[in-house]
């Protein structure tokens, strides 16, 4: 089935709420959702979520909660009234922690379990004793699915494997999405398990990346993109171009 709606989640990586609101407004219908992470939430707290929801945006609250089950359950209960669409927790917190989070999310919020951070490469994971990225991702995805999570966060390099495991009913969110590099061969970057496609003028700490269309074709539902849009000379045009590139994949994950 052909996709007609943007899969882009705009990462609002700033501590300035007005800047975040301006970025989201300029991207307009080229995005599906905005992401409030630790930087913006740390500076502005729940008011950031309230303001963005009042502006009409769906919100992914990316706090990656990871603590003992009782603490995470209470944290999710405290955040639940904000009415966000997605709230992230670490799958590595274990099944009991994930179940506590799910029990506390009584409203519209989907608890999204983060598998392996996109900043980690094979060497990093070996140092941590976690094995290869694909194996570690699948192990954590199984834990989250068995606990009842209906949303997972994974890199686009592993998303096909996670989609095969999760089936069509689970929402898969992929950070580590970068538009094709300009110049000869642009558009053919596909999925890269090495260092990230560079964003001009921005330090980039992503290790396992893919282009928007490659990620969507591999099974992703939502693609988290920040600096390629927010640091572009024309954020609205950049958001539109990245959304169009993603939609070239057609049906995507579901």
Image (cartoon, helix red, strand yellow):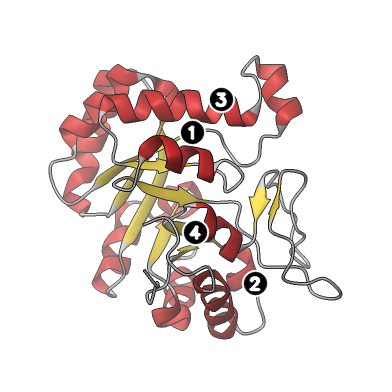
Q: Taking 161 as reference, is 238 above or below it?
A: below
Residue 136, disc: 3
Number of on-image labels: 4
Of badges 2 and 4, the one in the foreground is: 4
The residue where tag 1 is placed is 115
Residue located 50% across and 28% down the image: 138
Q: Earlier in the sequence, mark 3 or mark 4?
A: 3
Instruction: Left or right? Give the position of 226 relative to 111.
Output: right
Q: Is residue 68 left or right of residue 127?
A: left
x%, y% of residue 108?
A: 17, 52
Circles 3 and 1: CB atoms closer than 8 Å: yes
Left or right of 213? Residue 163 is left
User: Residue 66: in sight, yes or no?
Assistant: no
Q: Nearer the viewer, residue 239 or 245?
A: 245
Q: Which residue sits furthest top?
A: 129
Q: Residue at x 39, y 81 (%)?
A: 29
Q: Which mark is residue 231?
A: 2
Q: CA distance from mark 3 to mark 1?
A: 8 Å
Query: Residue 11, percent across and down?
Result: 50, 60
Distance, label 2 to label 4, CA atoms, is 17 Å
Circle 3 sits in a helix, a strand or a loop, which is it? helix
- The one nearer the camera, 81 or 165, is 165
Distance (Cα) linking label 1 and label 2: 27 Å
Report whether 173 appears left or right of 254: right
Q: Is residue 49 visible?
A: yes
Secondary structure under tag 2 reads loop
Name of the residue lying farthest toward the right: 184
Mark identifier at residue 223: 4
Name, please, the residue furthest toward the left.
Answer: 106
Viewer-nearest of discs 3 and 2: 3
């Amino acid at each position: 089935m052909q996709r007609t709606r943007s899969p882009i989640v705009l990462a609002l990586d700033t501590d300035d709420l007005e800047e975040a609101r301006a970025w989201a407004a300029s991207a307009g219908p080229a995005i599906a959702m905005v992401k409030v992470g630790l930087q913006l939430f740390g500076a502005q707290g729940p008011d950031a979520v309230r303001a963005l929801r009042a502006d009409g945006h769906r919100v992914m609250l990316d706090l990656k909660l990871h603590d003992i089950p009782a603490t995470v359950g209470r944290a999710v209960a405290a955040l639940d009234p904000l009415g966000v669409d997605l709230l992230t927790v670490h799958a590595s917190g274990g099944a009991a922690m994930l179940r506590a989070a799910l029990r506390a999310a009584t409203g519209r919020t989907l608890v999204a379990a983060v598998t392996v951070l996109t900043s980690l490469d094979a060497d990093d994971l070996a140092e941590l004793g976690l094995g290869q990225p694909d194996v570690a991702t699948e192990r954590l995805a199984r834990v989250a699915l068995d606990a009842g999570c209906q949303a997972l966060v994974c890199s686009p390099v592993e998303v096909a494997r996670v989609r095969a495991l999760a089936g069509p009913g689970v929402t898969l969110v992929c950070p580590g999405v970068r538009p094709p590099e300009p110049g000869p061969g642009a558009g053919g970057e596909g999925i890269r398990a090495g260092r990230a496609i560079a964003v001009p003028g921005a330090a980039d700490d992503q290790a396992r990346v893919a282009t928007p269309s490659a990620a969507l074709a591999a099974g992703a539902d939502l693609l988290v993109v920040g600096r390629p849009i927010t640091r572009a000379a024309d954020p609205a045009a950049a958001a539109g171009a990245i959304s169009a590139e993603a939609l070239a994949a057609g049906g995507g994950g579901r």
